[in-house]
Image: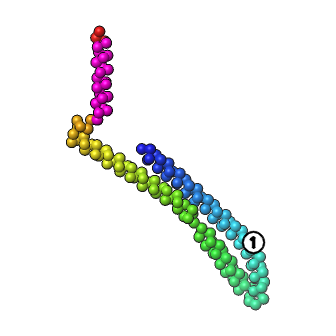
Amino acid sequence: MSRISRNLSIILRAERLIAQRQVAVAAKRTGIYGAAGLAIGLAVVMLNVAGFFWLSESVSNAVAALIMAGVDLVVALLLALFANSMSSQTDISAVVELRDLALQDIETEIKDNLAEARDAVTGFRRDPLGAVTPEIVSALLGALIKLSKSRKKSGD
């Protein structure tokens, strides 16, 4: 049973480490999204103004504004793709492997314990007297001796 409790402890620790790492990656990803949003906000204003003035010299104002909006969307898409490419899988692969090993060990131990219990029951069915171990016989004899001594003293 100590192996089971040890493995359960390992599994809980591994799950906690996995969750902590996933939260850390999510926090970093959120920070990058925020930085990307701020950068887009500041840069878009300046680039839009500069690009609009530059494009308005060669095309109409409406076409210049449309081109600038398209450039803004491409930049935003690139930043979002970069943030989505981050993953915690490389950081937690060893912890996941440790957790899986502990689960396999628990499963094996439970199967072994069930097999031992099944064998013991089968042995008891075949030979009930042979299944009684010497420890049980000695404990019963000890109890009977104490009982007889107590009766002898109370009878005196």
Judging depth in this view, the residue of 105 and 19 nearest the camera is: 105
Q: Name the residue: 74% across, 74% down.
A: 43
Q: Is residue 31 above or below residue 153?
A: below
Task: Locate residue 60, reporting x and y percent.
Answer: 74, 88
| 151 within the magenta span | yes
> Pointer 1: residues within 10 angstroms few (<14), some, or many (20+)?
few
Among the 4 quarters of the image, the one containing residue 66: bottom right
Q: Please give the range of residues in magenta.
A: 133-153
- Which colouring convention does the figure follow? rainbow
Q: Secondary structure at mark 1?
A: helix
Single out the residue that lies furthest toward the left.
126
| Quadrant of the image occupied by residue 36 | bottom right
Q: Amino acid at mark 1?
A: Leu
Write the residue at 52% across / 58% down. Answer: 95
Place of residue 47 in the rendered image (x, y in percent of width and height, measured from the top left) = 75, 78
Q: Position of residue 110 (x, y in %)?
A: 38, 49
Is residue 66 a member of the stretch shown in magenta? no
Return the x and y of residue 116 as percentages of the image width and height: 32, 46
Query: How many tags in the picture?
Result: 1
Residue at the top extreme, as displayed: 156
Q: Nearer the viewer, residue 29 or 102?
A: 102
Quarter occupied by the C terminus: top left
Q: Main secondary structure of the magenta part?
A: helix
Q: Residue drawn 73% across and 75% down?
A: 44
Residue holding disc 1: 42
Residue at horizontal 67%, vertical 81%?
70
Above or below 4: residue 80: below
Quadrant in the picture for the N terminus: top left
**Lateral position of residue 57 relative to residue 104, left or right:** right
Relative to 151, 6 lies left or right: right
